[in-house]
Image (spheres, rainbow, N blue to C red):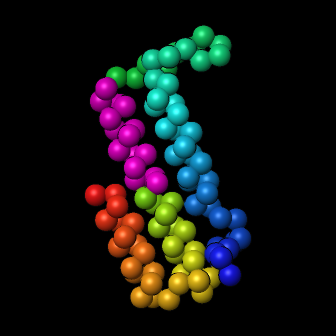
Amino acid sequence: MSGGHFGNSYEYYKVQQFADELEIEIQNNGKPDEYGDVQDYGPETIQYLRKQLCLMRQTAEIMRACDYLYSGDHGEDSFMEVVKEIEESYK
């Protein structure tokens, strides 16, 4: 089945994409963009954004596992194994 239970729109990919784009913005902090504009956020803000980036990636992976559970691609046991592995990988 490969997921698709929740409206067949794979919302977790949007969360992953947002996280990817945020990561690029964090890496480019303090550097001018193609228009010469500079986003220069302080260390506290960047640290907070990095923490949220990690949470977004974890959330996207858990969303995918939930989708697979409700699509019949995971049983309860394998679902719980997967989410525990995901949670462990983000500690």
Count of numbered tags: 0
Residue 80 percent across, percent down from the top left: 40, 81
Residue 87 percent across, percent down from the top left: 35, 65
Q: Is residue 1 rendered to the left or right of residue 80?
A: right
Q: Is residue 85 above or below residue 41?
A: below
Q: Residue at x 56, y 53 (%)?
A: 15
Q: Nearer the viewer, residue 3 or 39?
A: 3
Locate the C terminus and report the quarter of the image it occupies: bottom left
Q: Residue at x 70, y 65 (%)?
A: 9
Please say whether residue 83 is visible from this viewpoint: yes
Q: Is residue 89 rendered to the left or right of residue 13?
A: left
Dominant secondary structure of the residues highlighted in magenta in the image: helix
Any magenta on residue 49? Answer: yes
Q: Residue furthest top?
A: 36
Please say whether residue 70 is visible from this viewpoint: no
Magenta span: 43-57
Q: Nearer the viewer, residue 75 or 11?
A: 75
The quadrant where residue 85 appears: bottom left
Locate the N terminus and report the quarter of the image it occupies: bottom right
Q: Residue at x 51, y 73 (%)?
A: 65
Residue 82 percent across, percent down from the top left: 42, 75
Residue 64 percent across, percent down from the top left: 55, 68
The quadrant where residue 13 appears: bottom right
Any magenta on residue 82? Answer: no
Q: Is residue 42 rendered to the left or right of residue 4?
A: left
Q: Residue at x 51, y 38 (%)?
A: 22
Q: Is residue 21 above or below residue 59?
A: above
